[in-house]
Amino acid sequence: MLKPLTFIFIFALLRGFLVAQTPVFRPHQPEEWTQSKIKVIQQGHNGWIWMGTENGVFRYDGLDYEYFSLPDSISTAPNVSSIFDSGDTLWVGFDNGLIALLPEKKMANFRYMRPDNTKENHHGVLTIWQPEEGTPSKAITGFAADLAGNLWISTYGEGLYAWTGKRMYLFNTSDDGLCSDEIYTMLSDQQGQIWVATDNGISVATIGREGQKTVRNLGLKDGLPDEIVTALHKDLSGNIWIGTHDGGVCRYDAQGNTFHRILEQWNYGEVFDLVVYNDVELWITTSEGGLLHSDLKGIVQLIKPPTKAKQVLRDREGLLWLLGENGTVFSANLSVLHEVTSFSSVQAICTEQSGRVWAGNQTGLFVQKSNQWVQIGQKNSNIIALLRTPENQIWAGTFGEGISVYDTAGKRIKRMTISDGLPNGSILSMEVVGDHVWVATLGGIVVVRRNTFQVIDFETISDHAEAAKYYVYKIFCDSKGRVWCCTDGHGLGVWEHGKWRNLTESGGVSLKTIYSVVEDHDGRIWFSGDQTSLWRFDGVQLKQYTLKDHLHSTQINSLAVTGHGQLVIGYGNGIDVLTPETGHISFLGENAGVAISDISLNAACTDPLGNVWLGTASGVSRVAGYAQTFEIDPSTLIKTVVNVAQNIDFEHVHTFAYDQNHLIFEYAGIWLTNPTLVYYRYKLDGFDPDWTISKDRMASYPNLPPGQYCFRVQSSEHGYFEQTAEATYTFTIRKPFWAEWWFVLAIMAILGTLIRWYIKVREQRLKVVQEMENEKIAAQLDVLKTQISPHFLFNSFNTLITIIEESPEMAVDYVQHLADFYRSIMVHREKNFIPLSEDLDIARNFGFLLKKRFEDALQIHIDVPVPIGRLMPLTLQMLLENAVKHNVISKKQPLKIDIYLENNDTIVVKNNKNLKIKPEPGTRFGLQNLSQRYEVLTGKKVVVEQSNGSFVVKIPLD
Amino acid sequence: MISGGLWAQANSTGNFKCQNGVISFKSAAPLEKIEAQSKELKGIIDPVKMTFAWVVTVNTFEGFNNPLQREHFRENYMETTKFPTAIFQGKIIEEVDFSKVQKLTIRAKGKLTIHGVEKERIIKVNIDIQEKAIFVKCTFSIPLEEHDINIPKIVNQKIAEDVEVNMSAKLIKIE
């Protein structure tokens, strides 16, 4: 009975924390004022890490934290329970059902905050979301967006909400058949279906355009290993990875509608969370506190994480983030995992077809067995070269003791020494070339038949016997069958179909000692040598890579190519990962969370999965070689634009006044892998002739002249900017208004108009004067014409004849008055004004003449005791004449005319009205002309009053 | 008209019942404001099952600007001969203790049937629970298009596309 128990105990130990390519976890300690316990983490689309706490959310760029609080109207701050970045809005769910949001614009306008600034002065404020339907009253456990753009909100207790942008729908157990209203987590699959995880299985929900709901439930009967589902994650192929309470982890195959468990027996506890890496690895956190590393088929290793993680997160750069139950946050770079082995100073490394790793050092040969390293063969044999052949044999080259060949079970098949024909017992490198293995020994190159282990002289296969004597560090056979030999002092030797040549010089640089050589996936040869850094040979030309090409160092220890075609360059203190297509280089070292140091010379190999294994001073390191789907450059964004101490809404505002010309740009390049490495390159098009490269996260431009500008900024973690995306802000500073063309034009137009107007007014005045002059002349002429019209004379003479007969004296008097009248016309007609007394005299003379003609039928009363003032000549005469002309004059209906003064400033001519039935043909001028002339000359109006009985004309005196 | 058994048990002891709730609507149209109300809203809440049902006869709405407007409302828009009632029935999302005197904001999830078209809605409601009565108040909007309420083109100028509805009611506990 004891034995099985012991076995289980040992098994558990083996599965324990013994063997591990351990990630290096870096803590992210918020500043003092961010001590609020972190409840949830999420990455925003720009690369930020959002941290939800007991007290609002923080935005973290790897260096600094910025704080966004709930508005002051929320008195009791709830805990953040969920965060979701929809691309234009950050959604924050709280454990009391409250939902707040932060539009992208407001994030951008939030003033950048350094940790030494106080919290009170700088923080953003979230907006409370208030849809008409209200918000849930139970904890928000997740957000998701489907393909139609609907926002889904899961709750713990109320079920699932779908928000279409104008209407909210609720999916719950009783009405819609949701498997439970208590949802742990949620995701949107590749088809946009919403998966929710509950204690009662999984529900898959959709909503149609008209609000049509569908719910499909997946439970034990469908093959789910456990109905309590705690974690959901989707991979690149559209499969859903499901974490359960007791049943471990399973994969839902969307094609076959089936569930596949990764382990039939699960003894790691409840799955808290899980994340898939590039469809080849799973990282799982459990209630037992372990971090499980799975290759999708089983558990590869169990790592003890620095915190009991309740949430795991994979960011855009491929970092693994852990959020502990205690609120602590750690991140790890999984691209390089290092294992400290019991045997140190690994000198040689190779992998079997199964992926199992063999490593050798001064103390012997070791192989991975059940997650432990087991020694193979003799102790204290000094292994300096390892080779795996297509037969899956392991050839171990020693220092001084020849070659031992093992099968994968660890059994030695063959041993070759000097006595078997090797020129020397120390083996530097071995390589499979066709049916042979080429062996580089301290005594030169020999060839061994793989099937018989028979040693053949190099001269039999090569035209260059000299090469057999070379001291070769590394032999490499490329995809075209060429064999490359890294020689000491003779450059890079290449053997092709029996012909040998040496590459010893390129562009004046002589190639002497070469250490390492590999071939990339496009057939280019990469090699490195002593102090000559890195070379690329495309079959025709050699290209050198130096520090200028952002190589980390010229001291290259080993080269390898990952399964995805990336070149791994090993140094003493880290690795460069070079993408051959673009020349992009990323350095991974200690400050990138990669504990890799003292990589041994040519201790490198690529496993069948494409991972690169490196032997180092302290153990073995694995460089992840799966398809690189992660970002390799920082995400660059402009955070704020400040113009003359004013925050600018730079999404919308692009034009400034001439005095709004002091701009400050704050930007960020988010590179969480190694934030301190980030350099910026910025340039203000229209102002800067060249790029400025700096580590500052701010650029200031005081006193910009008017013009059009474009601020451009790029960020890079390796100083290689050519391929990195740039963030830009285009703006215009206007000229001052007085220098604007439109202003000049407007001023000219106004001036022109004024001048035109002045000329016009002047012309008009001249015209009026001219007209008046004409009128005066016309009036005089008219008066003359009237006065000397034949009619008047005829009437006068007829009257005279009558008088002469009756009384000659009176006739003399009449003629005298007639003469006086004409004389006064002659005297006064040129004048504008004459005294009233004189005009009265004219009127009297004229009246006398009329009286003689009409006798008692005409009665004229002039009542002006003191004549004062002036008026136009012949005014009264004209009015008398008018009265006589227009009215019937007879004994029965006499015409009565009164002339008198009113208010001492007006002379009034009043007559009783008794119009002729047939009106006299009027003259052109007359009363109207009189009025006009008065108005122009005196500015006063002539008043004409007509009533039934009388006709009154009031002439203002000057 | 109302399906389900809630009205059948309308007089069951323990339920809350309303006979004369007030429901009004207004359309804040650019040219003409249309407002009407009915005092004949009937409702029932089952505090155990947390279900409710409300119904109003559309023809009981009064208070239009003029008789012609009322006529249009009844015959052209609401077609009251075909669809005489408007109904909202469903469940209360939150758990509410109706025996406790308190004021709350809750949400009701249910089927809103207007003009014969049923739509699922969540409506936010303020309730004031007294010892023997409940006072209920809420405001929500009805997009006319959702309920196939067609408005002639020219009249589009008159009626807003969303109609705002206000209701308040007192429900008495059936002893």
Image (cartoon, rainbow, N blue to C red):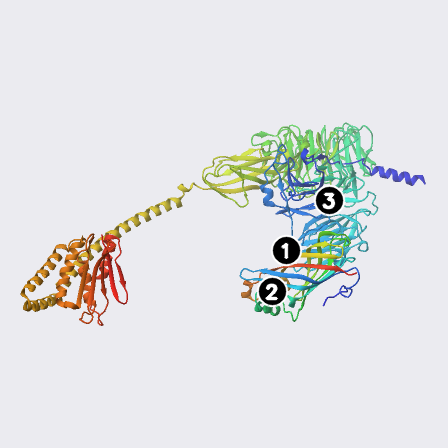
Chain bearing mark 1: A
Q: Earlier in the sequence, mark 3 or mark 1?
A: 1
Q: Nearer the viewer, residue A883 or A722?
A: A883
Q: Nearer the viewer, residue A852 or A468?
A: A852
Question: Toward which corner of the image does residue A553 lie, by quadrant?
Answer: top right
At label 2, counting other C-alpha atoms closer than 10 Å, the crowd grade (few under 14, some 14-19, many 20 or more) is: some
Question: Toward which corner of the image does residue A109 lie, by quadrant?
Answer: top right
**Quick one: SS at disc 3?**
strand
Image location of residue B114, percent across then percent down: 66, 64
> Does residue B120 appear anywhere in the picture?
yes
Chain bearing mark 3: A
Residue at numbered disc 1 = A166
Chain bearing mark 2: B
Image location of residue B41, percent across then percent down: 68, 63
Kindly report which numbered mark, 3 or 1, lies closer to the viewer in this rendering: 1
Amino acid beneath label 2: Gly
Same chain for the residues under marks 3 and 1 in the image: yes
Question: Is residue A509 depicted above or below A914 in this figure?
Answer: above
The reply, left or right, for residue A287 in relation to residue B76 is right
> Does residue A724 appear anywhere in the picture?
no
**Residue occupying the point 74% across, 66% down:** B3
Kindly report which numbered mark, 1 or 2, lies closer to the viewer in this rendering: 2
Q: Nearer the viewer, residue A915 or A238?
A: A915
Residue at numbered disc 3 = A275
Image location of residue A136, percent across then percent down: 70, 51
Question: Toward which corner of the image does residue A351 lie, by quadrant?
Answer: top right
Residue at numbered disc 2 = B63
The CA span between labels 1 and 2 is 30 Å
The CA span between labels 2 and 3 is 62 Å
Amino acid beneath label 3: Val
